[in-house]
Image (cartoon, helix red, strand yellow):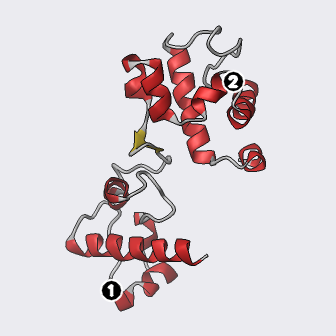
Amino acid sequence: SELTAAYGLDSISCGGVIAFAMECFERGLLTLQDTGGLNLRFGNGPAMLQMIEQIALRRGLGALLSEGVARASKKLGPTTEEFALHIKGQEIPMHEPRWKQGMGIGYMVSPTGADHCHNIHDSNYAAPNPLLEDMRSLGILEPLSVNDLSPAKIRLLIYNSLWMHFLNCAV
């Protein structure tokens, strides 16, 4: 995160695109020649740090990866598509939408895809806390289970999304 911030990169998208490249490398869809000699196996921290720099400076494989997983996958071919995890071109944050079902719906309806910044974090509303108190004026009176998909959860998702979009615009 420190290195991506120093280069002005989104750490979630950068991590997602490097994970995509590592998956492709481990499955033989990218070679050492493609990576400029970098052994892009999962767990190879030094290679990951080098790839962050290549992405930031658009050098070598980093030039392709800097475009994100959706575009990189299109250029690398259909055998890579199943490893290009994104929604509407946005790499997926590692929040589990099968568990946080409100977040999963938020990813689907968000104009920017898998964005966790203006999405609902279901666990924030599963127990009494200050965030839930803030939602009382919107009719969200009781904690909602993380995997709840009732009309109250959908209302919370809509109001939360509108509020977060407003805050993002107001800054």
Query: Residue visible at 47% across and 65% down?
Result: 118
- Residue occupying the point 69% across, 31% down: 58
Residue 120 point in image, percent of width and height: 41, 66
Residue at image x 27%, y 64%?
Answer: 148
Q: Is residue 155 above or below residue 66?
A: below
Look at label 1 and name its amino acid: Leu
Tell me: 162 left or right of 17. Answer: left
Q: Nearer the viewer, residue 37 or 136?
A: 37
Q: Which residue type does callout 2 highlight?
A: Asn
| Residue 54 percent location from the top left of the image | 72, 29
Q: Closer to the camera, 82 or 166? A: 166
Quadrant of the snapshot with the C terminus: bottom right
Where is residue 56 shown, x and y percent of the image? 71, 37
In the rendered view, tell whether residue 61 sits above or below residue 125. above
- Under circle 1, the secondary element is loop
User: Which quadrant would residue 79 be assigned to in this image?
Assistant: top left
Q: Residues within 10 Å of mark 1 (few under 14, many from 20)?
A: some
Residues marked 1 and 2 touching at CB (< 8 Å) = no
The residue to which callout 2 is attached is 44
Label 2 element class: loop
